[in-house]
Amino acid sequence: MKVKALKNKSGILSGLAALKSEAVLSSGRTVTDTEEEAQKIIDNLYADAFRKGIPMFYKDDRSKALTQFIRANPDGSEDLVNFDVAQGEYMLIKNLL
């Protein structure tokens, strides 16, 4: 079984996929084709948000608690943040990049 890292244009890991590339879905497209199209959509969403000055949030092994996220900023930097549900705000824990 093949494992592929899914990353956006900035190289940020957004997931892993362990799939057979030759498997065909009910749409008639292969899993690989579908995965590549999904990655293009994710890349476009990140690029559009960054053009507008909007950061994107995701989780990885650096965000240990359920309320912690990685904030990918339009300038290419990343921050570890905590989401305060009661206040509806993100609070900076530390700068990562």
Image: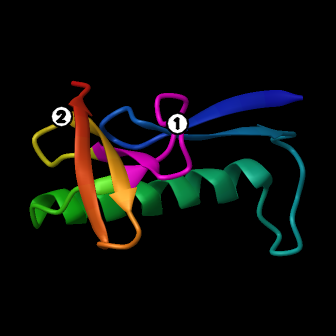
Under tag 2, what secondary structure? loop
Residue 44 in sight here: no
Q: Which residue is mark 2?
A: 77
Residue 80: x, y in percent?
32, 37
| 76 w.r.t. 32: above or below | above
- The residue lying at 10 percent from left, 67 percent from top is 52
Residue type, numbered disc 1: Asp
Q: Which residue is mark 1?
A: 60
Residue 57: x, y in percent?
37, 54
Left or right: where does residue 75 sit relative to residue 85?
Answer: left
Residue type, numbered disc 2: Ser
Based on the picture, tell me whether residue 69 belongs to the magenta stretch: yes
- Furthest residue toward top: 97
| 93 w.r.t. 24: above or below | above
Left or right: where does residue 23 sit relative to residue 4?
Answer: right
Q: Which residues are magenta?
A: 57-71
Left or right: where does residue 11 sit relative to residue 39?
Answer: left
Considering only order in the chain, which callout, 2 or 1, is on the residue closer to the N terminus?
Answer: 1
53 vs 45, nearest the viewer: 53
- The residue lying at 56 percent from left, 60 percent from top is 38
Left or right: where does residue 33 sit relative to residue 60?
Answer: right
Disc 1/disc 2 C-alpha distance (Å): 15 Å
